[in-house]
Image (cartoon, rainbow, N blue to C red):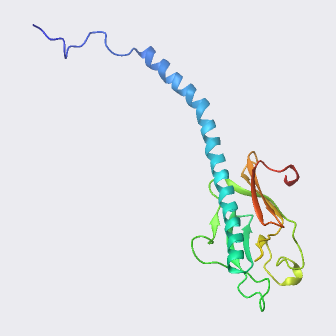
Amino acid sequence: MTSRVGRLRPNSGFTLLEIVIVVILIALVMTLVVPRLVGTFGSASVTSGARQVASMLRYARGRAVMDRLRYRVELDLKNGEYWLAVETDPIRKRGVFQPTEGNVGGRRKLPGSAVFGEFRNNARTADSPDREDQGGPRGDGVVFYPDGRGDSAQLVVQDEKERFGYTIEVMSALGRIVLREGIEEDLR
């Protein structure tokens, strides 16, 4: 009895034409799929960045109520950074916010291709530390108060090419933070 195991047929294998066709098909699929994947990763970093900023805003509101102090989420719009600051001495140093220590409120940077877009703080009142007559920090940010209120503000987190983004809105009276997909038309 002879075994056929181990014996090769003389015509086994792939022809050059078959290999070329497979390579062409793989290249065609890659040209269609890779751009979509790159866009997906870019939008994922924008989504992640918007959620992280919204989370810090919610955390600031909670700390303001819990500690009975004003907290401010500072925004460096140009460099895509944000951090938490607290007004530690509201009587002697009103409007002076100090960065908080630790992992939660420390300085953070938006991930990947995410950048800050338009920022609008509509709550410039006499009580707001951003007013020129207050001597407080200059720059962009959102203040949360011990009673749960927050500055009325809108912030856009978007991709570098402004194709995709989120609008984060802080509702003043409630201090509620709303995250909406898309860039509001009046913030473009």
- The picture places residue 117, in percent across and down from the top left corner, at 77, 57
- The picture places residue 86, in percent across and down from the top left corner, at 70, 79
Taking 82 as reference, is 128 above or below it? below
Of residue 73 and residue 178, the one placed in the foreground of this image is 178
Of residue 9 and residue 152, the one placed in the foreground of this image is 152
Q: Quadrant of the N terminus?
A: top left
94 relative position to 30: left or right? right
- The picture places residue 107, in percent across and down from the top left corner, at 63, 70
Q: How many marks?
A: 0
Of residue 41 and residue 100, the one placed in the foreground of this image is 100
Taking 110 as reference, is 163 above or below it? above
33 relative position to 1: left or right? right
Q: Residue at x 73, y 88 (%)?
A: 89
Q: Residue at x 87, y 66 (%)?
A: 122
- The picture places residue 179, in percent across and down from the top left corner, at 74, 55
Q: Residue at x 61, y 30 (%)?
A: 32
Q: Residue furthest bottom?
A: 92
Q: Quadrant of residue 146?
A: bottom right
Taking 18 as reference, is 72 above or below it? below
Q: Residue at x 69, y 71 (%)?
A: 62
Of residue 96 and residue 89, the one placed in the foreground of this image is 89
Q: Residue furthest top?
A: 1
